[in-house]
Amino acid sequence: MSNVVTFPGTRPPSNIRELRNPSYQLPTENVVDSTPGKARRHRRQQSELQTETGKNAKIRRQRREAWWQSERRVEYWKACMKMHSAIRSAQLAGLPEGDNHQTAENWHWHPIIDSYRKAIAELLLTPASTLLNVAWKQKALAAEEHKYTDLSSERVEAAIARDLEFLTAHPTRRKPAG
């Protein structure tokens, strides 16, 4: 009795014994990678690098990755602050859920808030990849998010100006001439 399962629409291998034999080697020469779309993706990447729009897209993609990383760091520390506050509140209220954690003291708050402020400062200085990121920086500047960091308003304004200059010099699409 065979332990090979066949499904409708598939055919069993021509020589099952070869597949079971660990010493049997599959051919390594003249093997074509038939991954669907791989050749098309490679051609698209090649053509992107040759056009101005493609070059701009690559640069923006690099900036986007850096922005996302900094943004995730801010979200992490924001969540830590909320969690510390929730734990402290549960422990002060005497809820049994508070016993699941170490005692949350007031002085534990300071390193968390310092790390959050450092992450905000880093995000304000991270190069923006879109106008939406620049708008966030402008709102954060207006809300004085940098107030308790070592950043000055002028330094944040200079970073925003550099971002706007970059986005103008590296548009997503060129306007047709005429």
Image: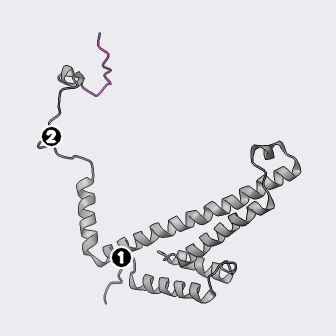
Residue 43 position by quadrant:
bottom left
In reply to whether residue 44 is colored magenta, the answer given is no
Q: Which amino acid does label 1 sit on?
A: Asn
Residue visible at 48% across and 86% down in the picture: 162
User: For the view shown, which residue lies furthest in the left direction?
Assistant: 30
Q: What stretch is highlighted in magenta?
A: 1-14
User: For the view shown, which residue lies furthest in the right direction?
Assistant: 93
Reading the chain from its start, which is encountered first: label 1 or label 2? 2
- By secondary structure, the bulk of the magenta-drawn segment is best described as loop
The crowd level at tag 1 (other Cα within 10 Å; few <14, some 14-19, many 20+) is some
Kind of element beneath mark 1? helix
In x, y percent, where is residue 177? 31, 88
Q: In this view, does 86 lie to the left or right of 50?
A: right
Which color scheme is applied? one colour
User: For the view shown, which residue lies furthest in the top direction?
Assistant: 1
User: Where the C terminus falls, by quadrant?
Assistant: bottom left
Kind of element beneath mark 2? loop
Residue located beneath label 2 in the image: 28
The crowd level at tag 2 (other Cα within 10 Å; few <14, some 14-19, many 20+) is few
Q: Are marks 1 and 2 in contact (CB under 8 Å)?
A: no
Q: In this view, does 90 lie to the left or right of 124?
A: right
User: Where the N terminus falls, by quadrant?
Assistant: top left
Tell me if residue 110 comes above or below residue 166 in the rendering: above
Q: In this view, does 18 lie to the left or right of 73?
A: left
Tell me if residue 23 comes above or below residue 155 in the rendering: above
Nearer-the-camera pick, 107 or 60: 107
Residue visible at 68% across and 58% down in the picture: 80
Residue located beneath label 1 in the image: 56
How far is mark 1 from mark 2, CA to CA?
Answer: 39 Å
Q: Is residue 119 left or right of residue 4?
A: right
In x, y percent, where is residue 88? 80, 55
